[in-house]
Image: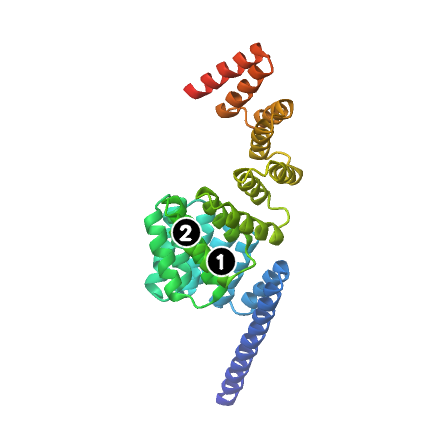
Amino acid sequence: MNLVWLILTFGICVFSVQGQDNATNFYNRAMNERDKGDYDKAIADFTEAINLNSNYFEAYARRSSTKLLKDDYDGAIADSTKAIQINPKFAPAYNNRGVAEDNKKDFDGALADYNMAIKLDPKFWMPYQNIGDVKFEQKDYDNAIANYTEALKLENDDFRKASSYYGRGLAKMKKNDGDGAIADFTQGIKLNPKYPDNYYLRGNIEKSKGDYDNAIADYNRAVELNPKFVFAYCGRGDAKTGKYDDDGAIDDYTKAIEFDPKYTRAYWHRGLTKKHMSNYDGAIADFTKAIELDPKNAEIYRERSELRRLTHDYDGAMSDLNKAASLGQN
């Protein structure tokens, strides 16, 4: 009898070890597939790992983060919650669940999970970054900056630090701290020189300061990295207008329209440039298109009204003025 129980017990132990080994193999394969961007295969293999080891909380957490990459927020919440049930002290699971809640606009739930992740692991940089994002969304820019700063203290990876500098730069822009924002975007560029948004946003601040040459240089780099970056074309057009390069500005606005025919600002600003060049018919046509796209923009009606008056379309001019006035009252 004892020999039988010993054999049975030994057999169970071997099965358990082999099952765990197989679960780990599926887990490792899933991680490789996820890194390669094959999220469906990764999820399938994380699931196999879980089937072999129902207490494999890391597999639930990784499957959760993979589902986040597929915008499956409900699935991510379910997997994170399961990981937490198995191991309530596993900080990444709270962070993952917070990200899903954040994307579902459950900011209170997200902040609660991010703060729990920090409580469990005070040196975990990611929840600080994520709290910064939520606070930015809530227009609490001071706390956004504070959390991005904390993330920067803890993170050593250049690519991830660049993300925190970018977020902090955006928050500083919202607080009208242009110099501070430029400093953060510059640091982000040093750490990740291939991210076009840092150049674009730094260019916007330089343009607002009248530093058109540096703004154009940054917009140039932004469109080199992203040739379909319509906002950067439009920004560069504005900077060229500031340098009285009307032809160059027209080219940039037109390029923005080619990539996004519904981009109101490109038509509006191209119309303004044509007005400056005394091409009133062309300007009216652009203002008209801009109004089609944004019929509640009183300023464009006022611009078109002025040109209609100059081209002796007095009824049209008065109609636009009245429309602008009615919109201004709403």
Task: Name the residue carrying label 2.
Answer: 181
- Nearer the observer, 237 or 242: 242
| Residue farthest toward the right in the current orientation of the protein | 258
Other residues around mark 1 within 10 Å, as few (<14) / some (14–19) / many (≥20): many
For marks 1 and 2, give the one nearer the viewer.
Answer: 2
| Residue farthest toward the top in the current orientation of the protein | 315
Q: Amino acid at mark 1?
A: Asp
- Label 2 SS: helix
Other residues around mark 2 within 10 Å, as few (<14) / some (14–19) / many (≥20): many
Q: Is residue 249 visible?
A: yes
- Label 1 SS: helix
Task: Name the residue carrying label 1.
Answer: 79
The answer to whether 126 is drawn above or below residue 248 in the figure is below
Is 58 displayed left or right of 151 in the figure?
right
Is 22 displayed left or right of 84 in the figure?
right
- Nearer the observer, 316 or 213: 213
Q: Position of residue 154 (x, y in %)?
A: 38, 66
Residue at 65% from the left image edge and 37% from the top image edge: 254
Disc 1 to disc 2, C-alpha distance: 38 Å
The answer to whether 193 is drawn above or below residue 319 in the figure is below
